Image: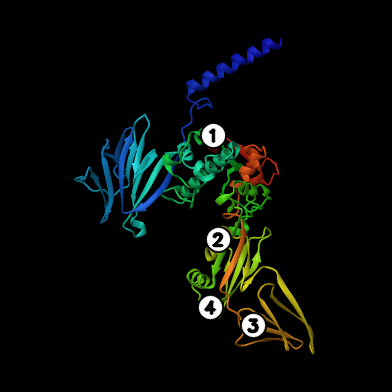
Amino acid sequence: MAQTKRWGLHWLLMALFGLLITTGIVTPVEARELPLLRVLLAQQTSADVRVISGTYQWFDEETNGIIEDAGQKTWTASASGAVINLVKDNKSLAKSFNGPLLLKAVGSGENILEVNGKKYRGSLRVYYLRSQGTNSLALINVIDMESYLNGVVGMEIGSGAPEEAIKAQALASRTYALQQRDRRDSFGYYYDVQATQSSQVYQGIAGETPRVTQLVNATRGQVVTYDGKLIEAVFHSNSGGQTEDARYVWNSDVPYLRGVPAPEDKYAEEMKGSAALAYHWRKPVTARQLAGQTLSLTGKDPGDVKSLRIAETSPSGRVTRLEVIGTKGIISVDKTKVRQLVDTPSTKFTISGSGGSGSADLQVLSNGSSGVTKTTVATTGSYQLKSSGLAVLTATATAISAEGTTTLSGSSSTANEFILDGYGFGHGVGMSQWGAMGLAKAGKKYNDIIEHYYNQDRRDDRLRIVGEWGN
């Protein structure tokens, strides 16, 4: 009886499948068209382009007309006046164009073109950036998502990384690119992502390796969602042992971008050399450098910098506010500009050196005629015992005595150099790439890595890995 029921169900399903085919309803069996991505390669006044393989045609997207077959020719597109000029084998075409222009792959073979000496798959769109008041072109590589990832993932995490870490990077990179595409498209942008660290590092064919391509294919179409929506799957090189809440970096409180312990970040130290510096680093900064950078960044002149003070930190130990103390006053720099000010790999650092001030303070008590008073001074710096009390030499020296505090003239110290001792590389939010490699070496699968960094191991089913590019 069970056998008869099973075959009855089989024929019923086959009949339904045939009905779906004849009525034109798309089924999971049918191939889904790959999502396309618009990658901003560069903005410049001209570009040299040639077809390496396949069949291409130049299209004028303003008129939707074919300009001509690209052939195996060398082309130069340039911004001139208010138009785009095309030059073929050193001979200008008779007509100029408003643009955009599209060098479109129309062949069924392997379509590869070269732009300014670098090889890319897909097509090339050329915009004239009139709205930005510049005499330049935007060069956009229009490419399918999976081919794009083949040129990204190895550049981001390294082609020699553990397999499960590469798969996790593929999911993060694919999800991030699609989320950025949807967001920018809603605002009418002419591109989805950039080919630099501003988005993800993309090197086209130069970034491809057979190993990475194989592992990207193993996750084909898979993306990460939270409550059914694509997450903004940001990542960084190394968190220094603890990832950060997005609210402490970008003022954005996102439930899937919360800090988690990441002791696996120390895996970078096993690789030694420059890789180890992604976990623990030291950097000297001179007072002169600080003064110039403070003026450039804030528009305020601190004068001669005497001290650099960590005023606030996040729970993970990242600096969220710095104070530059100079002869012209104290200038506060918030979390969004800390890395720009000191040009460090991360904001997770402490300060030492002449005039340096860490986040901890020294509380000095004085018992005078008005009772016990408390004064806060830095834990680092130079101190000298005088008859009037204890003098702390910072931007302006302060004498602390039984009568309270007074400012001493002519005895301020000069901070020549500050030593920043830090951990981590990058903003610290989302997935740590070195941590992902450490987790993979410890036997974790890529879905475990994604769950750890983007859902704090809650496994509450709000975070999911889904296929078909989230469609």
Closer to the camera in the image, 43 or 101: 43
In whole angstroms, how far apart are the C-alphas of marks 1 and 3? 61 Å
Please say whether residue 236 is visible from this viewpoint: no
**Numbered disc 4: secondary structure:** loop
The residue beneath circle 4 is: 304
Q: Is residue 37 left or right of residue 418?
A: left
Closer to the camera in the image, 437 or 257: 437
**Numbered disc 1: secondary structure:** helix
Q: Are marks 3 and 2 in contact (CB under 8 Å)?
A: no
In whole angstroms, how far apart are the C-alphas of marks 3 and 4? 15 Å
- Quadrant into which the N terminus falls: top right
Q: Is residue 109 left or right of residue 17?
A: left
Instruction: Give the crowd class for mark 1: few <14, some 14-19, many >=20 residues within 10 Å.
Output: some
The residue beneath circle 3 is: 397
- Residue 189, horizontal then vertical, whole percent: 43, 50
Outermost residue toward the front in this view:
273
Q: Amino acid at mark 3?
A: Ala
> What residue do we see at 79% from left, 90% from top?
369
**Numbered disc 2: secondary structure:** loop
Instruction: Give the crowd class for mark 4: few <14, some 14-19, many >=20 residues within 10 Å.
Output: many
In whole angstroms, how far apart are the C-alphas of marks 4 and 1? 54 Å
In whole angstroms, how far apart are the C-alphas of marks 4 and 2? 21 Å
Q: Upstream in the sequence, badge 3 or badge 2?
A: 2
Q: Amino acid at mark 2?
A: Thr
In this view, 408 is above or below 347: below
Q: Upstream in the sequence, badge 4 or badge 1?
A: 1
Q: Amino acid at mark 1?
A: Leu
Q: Which mark is residue 344?
A: 2
